[in-house]
Image: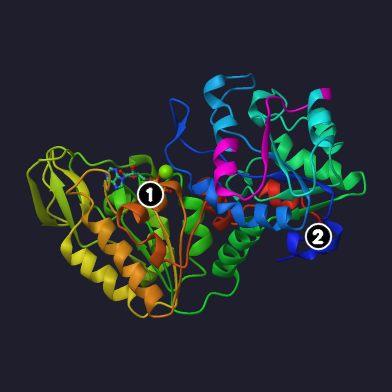
Amino acid sequence: MTKASLRDVPTAELRGRPALLRADLNVPLEDGRITDDTRIRETLPTLRLLVEAGARVVVLSHLGRPKGRPDPGCSLRPVAERLGELLAARVHFHPELTGPGTRSAVDALAPGEILVLENTRFDPGEEKNDTSLAGALAELADLFVNDAFGAAHRAHASTAALPERVRARGGRAVAGLLMEKELELLGRLLAEPERPFVAILGGAKISGKIDIVQSLLPRVDRLLIGGAMANTFFRALGLDVGASLVEEDRTELARATLEQAGDRLVLPVDCVVADRIEGGAATRIVPRDSVQPGERIGDIGPASRALFETVLRPARTVLWNGPMGVFEQPPFDEGTVAVARAVAGATERGALTVAGGGDSAAAAQAAGVTDRLSHVSTGGGASLEFLAGDPLPGVAALSDR
Ligand code: ADP
Ligand code: MG
């Protein structure tokens, strides 16, 4: 990695020093209760390092979409409480982001203590990448640590303007341990994948993923495509997809991609179809050229599962993004579960396997393979933009190594 990491900062320099940690603590809340604390847990290694080194840690994060004004339903207070339960450290919460009260709360922090400030998105300057908000925050510390990979594709005040201001004032802006891990693993996929390198793309729309297809095609040995994305490729082959989700206006793009990819691009050969994609719907398994008018494709079929498994068997590097079908609705989850297990099998044979994308992480969880993959990226949109080759503003703003 060309960017500086927290591990480049000597531990002795951290003792008693205020450090601003931008984390991604954007957890799902229901009635003020955290329903999934994965994002909190993922950033614990960075927090532990800072706490054990005796830094005075000021934590920043967004949560939800409060649109630039305070919204009690999006408060970080429950997150601060959960951090206190998970860490052997004192965790304080301050219900503001800037101002004299914040300053005093930071000054009162003892070495090894944590102060969580209120939601960055309560301030209208956050999403505008406002330099005065960044300037106010930069006065709190001369060390900025960004562990929020999931927010790195956004140029917001706490991810972009703030590290720039910290550096302009002579301080350092470094990647946290989670950010470093994400960049290293995803970077390895793009830079020096062990071969064969197999990518699996699925999900709803080709339009949202065409940049990734373009970025991956020259790099992969095989690109497997499932999900509704495959339907647009079926149309490009002149096949009927009945009432399936399809992007007719992308058919030409799909045709050009097929031509460019040759036999590296592998499409499903059969499909699970139904009149409606609902639980209890009667399903049929049909070859991909036999979808009837009114039928909807809800998943890849068993022959496609076997084909995809065969392609995955020798893989040394695997990237998986996007479900193979409507995995939220059994029985249309079988293709996704089979692919998830095949990817887990590749891990067990020594391959580097990475899942990226919000729904892919959920699908890996549903298939019970999260712990059997090398890495499940915590950044949905960020991992997709990274893999498409786009620079991430939150990474670009960090100090060079
Ligand atoms: P990710 O978040 O992993 O990048 P996407 O957001 O692109 O994935 O796509 C996930 C969605 O795609 C899921 O909600 C799933 O139901 C939908 N999907 C997958 N296959 C189909 C299909 N054949 N028809 C309709 N929707 C599909
Ligand atoms: Mg999604």
Task: Tell me, for residue 400, which label it has, or none.
Answer: 2
Q: What is the x, y in percent for residue 364?
A: 36, 56
First reached walking from the N terminus: tag 1 or tag 2:
1
Could you tell me which residue is drawn at 32 percent across and 62 percent down?
A: 340
Task: Please state if 11 lies on the left or on the right of 255 as rendered.
Answer: right
- Look at discs 1 and 2 and give the one toward the viewer: 1
Could you tell me which residue is drawn at 21 percent across and 56 percent down?
A: 334
Q: Give the image quarter of residue 61.
A: top right
Task: Tell me, for residue 362, which label it has, or none.
Answer: 1
Residue furthest to the right: 170
Mark 2, residues whose alpha carbon is within 10 Å: few (<14), some, or many (≥20)?
A: some
Which element carries disc 1, helix, strand or loop?
helix
Q: Is mark 1 within 8 Å of ligand 1?
A: yes
Q: What is the x, y in percent for residue 218?
A: 51, 68
Q: CA distance from mark 1 to mark 2?
A: 34 Å
Mark 1, residues whose alpha carbon is within 10 Å: few (<14), some, or many (≥20)?
A: some
Could you tell me which residue is drawn at 66 percent across and 29 percent down?
A: 118
Residue 330 visible at all: yes
Which quadrant is the C terminus positioned in? bottom right
Q: Nearer the viewer, residue 77 or 288?
A: 77
Q: Determine whether label 1 and label 2 are within 8 Å by CB.
A: no
Q: Nearer the viewer, residue 386 or 59?
A: 59
Q: Nearer the viewer, residue 213 or 395?
A: 395
Q: What is the x, y in percent for residue 246?
A: 30, 42
Residue 241 visible at all: no
Q: Which residues are magenta?
A: 80-100
